[in-house]
Image (cartoon, grey):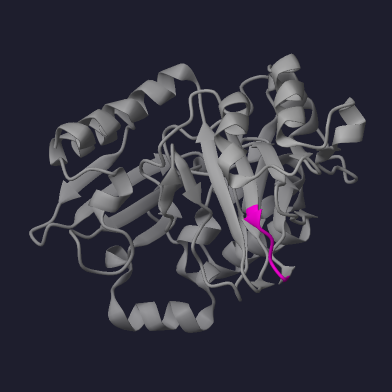
Amino acid sequence: MNADLNWRPLEIGPSDVGAAATAEGLLAHLRDHGDLEDLLVKEKAVVFRGFGVAPGELDGALDLLLPNRLAYVHGNSPRTKVGKNVYTSTEYPQEYTISMHNEMSYAHQWPARLAFYCEVAPATGGATPVVDGVRWLEALDDEVRAAFAGGVRYTQNLHDGYGLGKSWQQTFETDDRGAVEEFLAGAEAGWEWKADGTLRVTQLRRATTRHPVDGTEVWFNQADQWHAAGLGDETAATLARILPPEDLPQSVTFADGSPIPAEWVLQIRDRGLDSAVDVDWNAGDLLLIDNVLVGHGRRPFTGSRRVLVAMSNSAADAARAAQLRTAVDAA
C-alpha cells in the first residue's frame, strides 16, 4: 500500500455533525456514532474541535471514545497520573521536540487507540505532530528497511528508587516483584534482578507490524528513541561518560545484539518528523488516533501547555493490565 501524501486527520466540529458547540453536543454525537472502529481505520486520526470540553467533562467523553481504558503499565516515558487512567503527556522540557513514535511499540501489547485532550493551550508551538505509518516506512532508505527486517532488541534498566530514568515501581505501578514477573512472563520479555535492586528487562520485537483490521504494514518501533544517538551528540556523550551502554536506562540494538548505526537512527527520527502533519491545539480539543496506523510526537512550545492522554485496548489486554492494578491494591 502506498502512502497518501495528502493525508491529514479528519477534523469534526459541531457544524459538521449538526451538534451543539458544547461537550454535551459531542457526547450526543458519540452516543449516536459510538463505534469508531471503521472510522479510525479509514481516517487513522480524528480531531474533535470546537466543542469546548472542560476538564470536568473529560471523563464522559473518554468513556465513549476509549472503551477499556488502560493504565500506563510498562510505559517508559515520565508521566503523572491525574485521573481514571488519564495521564499527562510525556513530561519533557518544553524547548525540545519529542520525535515520532507509536505508543509502547516496544511492548508485547500496545494500546489500540490514544486520545489526547488539550486542557491548556500553549502560547506558541506545542503542536502534536502525527505521521502515517505507511508514509514513514516508505520514507526510509531501502538498506535501512532491510537491516531492520530481523527486528530489534530493547533493554531497560529500571532502578529500585534511586538512579537515572524510571524505577521499576513507577514503571509497573506496583512494588510487588511477583506481579511484575507475572506481567513480564505474559509479555514474552526476559528479566533479571540485579544485586542493587535494578530490574533489567530485555524484549525482542519486530520493527514493523500489520494493522489487525486491514493488514496495512507500518513502521512500528522506537529504535530512534531508545538509541543514544537519538538524544543528540551532547546528551549521548554525557551518558557515555557516566554509564556503559549495557547499563543505560534504556538502549536498543538489532535483534542479534549488533549495534544500530547512529546515522540510521537519525534518518528514522528526522524522516518521521519531516513526514508528519501538525495538530495545533485549542483548549477543549480532543484528538483520537489509531496507535498502529499513526505515530505521534510533540513540537517545542512556549508558555503553559497541558495535554492529557488516555489509552484503550481490547478487553483481553485490559484484563492483563487489571491484574497489575489488583496487585497494587493488595500490596
| Residue at image location 55% in from the left, 34% down from the top | 59
| Residue at image location 81% in from the left, 43% down from the top | 50
Give the x, y percent position of residue 242: 29, 80
Please tell me which residue lies in front, 185 or 53. 53
Q: Is residue 223 left or right of residue 174?
A: right
Please tell me which residue lies in front, 137 or 302. 302
Quadrant showing the C terminus: top left
Give the x, y percent position of residue 78: 42, 58
Give the x, y percent position of residue 176: 15, 40
Residue 191 visible? The answer is: yes
Q: In which image quadrant can residue 180 be found? A: top left
Q: Is residue 49 above or below residue 224?
A: above
Give the x, y percent position of residue 184: 27, 36
Please report the bounds of the magenta region as a residue range.
Answer: 119-123
Residue 208 visible? The answer is: no
| Residue at image location 44% in from the left, 48% down from the top | 82
Magenta span contains residue 154: no
Q: Is residue 215 above or below residue 161?
A: above
